[in-house]
Image (tube, grey):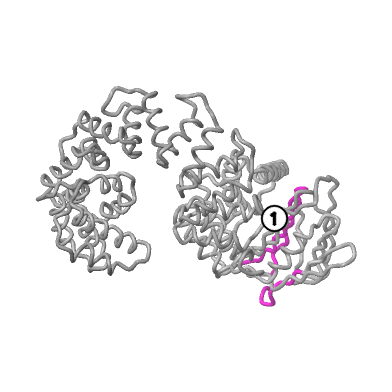
Amino acid sequence: MKRYIISLFLMLSSSAFATDIQSSEKPSAEQAKVDACLSAYFDGLKSGDFTQAVQNCINVPTNQGQIQYIAGLMYANGQGVAVNVYDALAYYTRSAENNYAEGQYSLGLLLLDNNESHNKGLAWLEKAAEQKHPVAQYYLGALYFNGDGVAQDYSKAEEWLEKSAQQNYAPAQYHLALMYTGGMGVNRDFNKGLELLNQAAENNDRLAQNTLGFIYTDGKEVTPDYELAMKWYEKAANQGDIYAQNQLANMYYKGDKIEQDYSKALDWYTKSAERGDLTSMVAVAYMYYNGKGAVQNYPQAYSWYQKAAEQGSVISQRMLGIMYQRGLGYDDSPDYPKAIEWFEKAAEQGDPVAQNSLGILYANGKGVEQDTFKAITFYEKAATQGYTPAQNNLGLVYQFGFGDLDVDTDKAIYWFEKAAAGGHEKAKDNLTKLKQQLAIEKATNTKKTEPVAPVPVSSPETKKTTSQVNKANTNNQITDLRIGDNKNYSRFVVESSQPINYTLTEDSVDSFTLVLNKTNVSEKLIRLLNSRVKKISGAIESIQSIEKQDNINFVIKLKKDITNVKKVQYKDNNHLLILDFMFQS
């Protein structure tokens, strides 16, 4: 009911209402009452003080329909008096019975809200419509079109909408236009519908303006005209229409048939976002994050992602996770627990990027206790959705083993192939290297669990130095590093995208030194090693990194209670170096 009453405010300032008041022929004393009521009421609308309006509109004895209508409106909206629907109904009834069309229309709407009085409400609407009340005519047409409380009747719908449209009532022109352009209840006549759309749009109907914008960009029924489309979208957008603001922003962003302008795109997205549009909030955040349309601004991006994330935007939840993970927008340092909190929200909505990110954090113990099972679980959730980075991560997990998970080269190949088929370049490289490694092992009739050129360490007399230098030369980017353990061995793995130049030296029964030539070692590898050596379990006691002029040395010391070294196994397949310290159970 409230929505109907509020719409009546607009009627008070309309030319139709004013004309109706001025053209009424009444005794001068009664006309003076009407004028005094209207003046006091409009003053109340401006000032918010309806004290004089109460005196001139409610406390005055009169049979004038206009005054009774205003009194009903004041009780309906609590203007100068307490809200009282029953008093509003009483005044609207008096106004209607005095044949005042606005009172008949308002009374009709009130009675339509009640099933028991629905028919009476319909009758009063018809009386107002017969007095050429354009809104009553439109409302009747809409009721018959939708079959809302009446039998659906397209003929009556067209009749009443046509009468309202002829009085230049924009909503009726728009509704009738949709009937003709879509052939809904009438014979389809696109040209007539287009004419009505233009009439409604010129009367500032934003829905008609939006529809014209779409028609001229779509180009299925008319010759595409992007300039005209922009004109109508801008008119609707300037009225605060979110859809039109989005369309303009999209067109400027994409440069689709118009000159690309990120600044204008950001401006329209921002206007729409400020009106609460979720999609626009994400777009604004994205543009600030990437510096499109404005200088890159992480705090602004963070602010908009935060607003959108709190409304359930999965992309924004993921991006907040990334920003907390990287320390962007809110602080200069990472906040892994907060990153996990937002990644989990996005992951619960099935976002594969967030699921993969959680897998990485659990695998590395960032913000949480390291948890092999959870890491693999999240990798698998993302991988089964076709997310190639997660598929590649699963391939690595199965290739090298992880925590209590044993090596499974068949599964590694399966996931590498999945990721490679999806275009993941590292997975293609990993797959090639793994297959090469397996081919070499097969050619030399060597099983994975058997030693390759073992270095006995059972006594000091067997101390040796093993050196391997490979000659291939690609680029100098380390792609992975793993330090893991199982029940009876510890593993140290280095994987490089170029051949590895290394030396492995047995220093004593329980100590070894791995020397990597710096020409093959990137800064990334050094950072990875230094960050992970503190998370060692299994048989390795410690790994100490020592940087020298040309080399970086890693002194690997075994746990003191490990006394029976079965063998040290090392493999080098150009880009892969694996050191397995194996012990008797």
Residue 307 visible, this orientation: yes
Magenta stretch secondary structure, dominant: strand
Q: Position of residue 76 (x, y in %)?
A: 23, 60
Q: Quadrant of residue 134?
A: top left
Image position, residue 50 (x, y; %): 29, 67
Residue 112 in the image: above or below residue 301? above
Q: Is residue 92 left or right of residue 239?
A: left
Left of 259 or right of it: where is 269? left
Asked if residue 94 is among those painted magenta in the image, a careful observer would answer no
| Residue that appears at 60% across and 57% down | 401
The quarter of the rendered structure image containing the N terminus is bottom left
Q: Which residue is mark 1?
A: 480
Secondary structure beneath disc 1? strand
Please indicate whether residue 133 sits to the left or right of residue 445 in the image. left
Q: Is 350 drawn above or below residue 130 in the view shown?
A: below
Q: In screen coordinates, is 157 left or right of 260?
A: left
State the image coordinates of residue 82 (x, y, percent, origin top left).
Answer: 22, 68
Q: Amino acid at mark 1?
A: Asp
Q: Crowding near pointer 1: few (<14 within 10 Å), some, many (20+)?
A: some
- Taking depth in this image into account, of 364 and 211 the one nearest to the observer is 211
Q: Which residues are magenta?
A: 556-585
- Most extreme residue toward the bottom is 560
Image height of 128 relative to 93, above or below: above
